[in-house]
Amino acid sequence: ACLGSAAMRTSSQWSCGHGYYSNADTGPTAGTSLRCKRCSSLCAQCSGASDRCTACAPGRSLIGGSCVSQCPAGTFRNAYLDRVLGEP
């Protein structure tokens, strides 16, 4: 079962659309049941949980799976990678 219009079929696999993550069945019927849940509003994309970001919403930068609006002390934002780099 899919929730809303978030699930998409690509070739022989189902996947969730942009801004959603998969809560797929991993049992004996793996791949036959896909639940798409919305990512946190801080994330543009996420994986495995709503707050495990893989890409950030505009104005935020990715650091360790989280999206921040300001870089921690001792770090800087790499605009090309849209990630926070350095050691906090």
Image: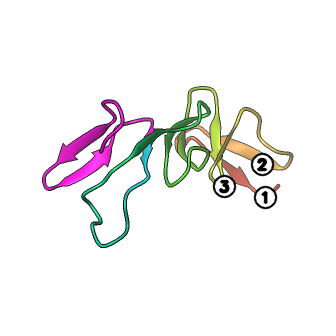
Percent x, y of residue 67: 65, 40
Q: Residue furthest right?
A: 73
| First of labels 1, 2 by sequence position | 2
Kindly indicate whether the residue at mark 3 contacts the one at mark 2 (C-beta within 8 angstroms). no
Q: Is residue 22 above or below residue 43?
A: below
The region drawn magenta spans 1-20
Q: Amino acid at mark 2?
A: Thr
Q: Amino acid at mark 3?
A: Gly
> Under tag 2, what secondary structure?
strand
Give left or right: position of 12 versus 35.
left
Kindly indicate whether the residue at mark 2 contacts the one at mark 1 (C-beta within 8 angstroms). yes
Q: CA distance from mark 2 to mark 3?
A: 12 Å
Residue, disc 1: 87
Query: Residue at point 30% right, 73% down?
Result: 28
Query: Residue at point 74% right, 55% down?
Result: 86
Q: Amino acid at mark 1?
A: Glu
Q: CA distance from mark 3 to mark 1?
A: 12 Å
Residue, disc 2: 75
Residue 32: image quadrant is: bottom left
Percent x, y of residue 33: 30, 54
Give left or right: position of 12 versus 72.
left
Residue 9 belongs to magenta span: yes
Q: CA distance from mark 1 to mark 2?
A: 6 Å
Residue, disc 3: 64
Query: Residue at point 62% right, 33% down?
Result: 42
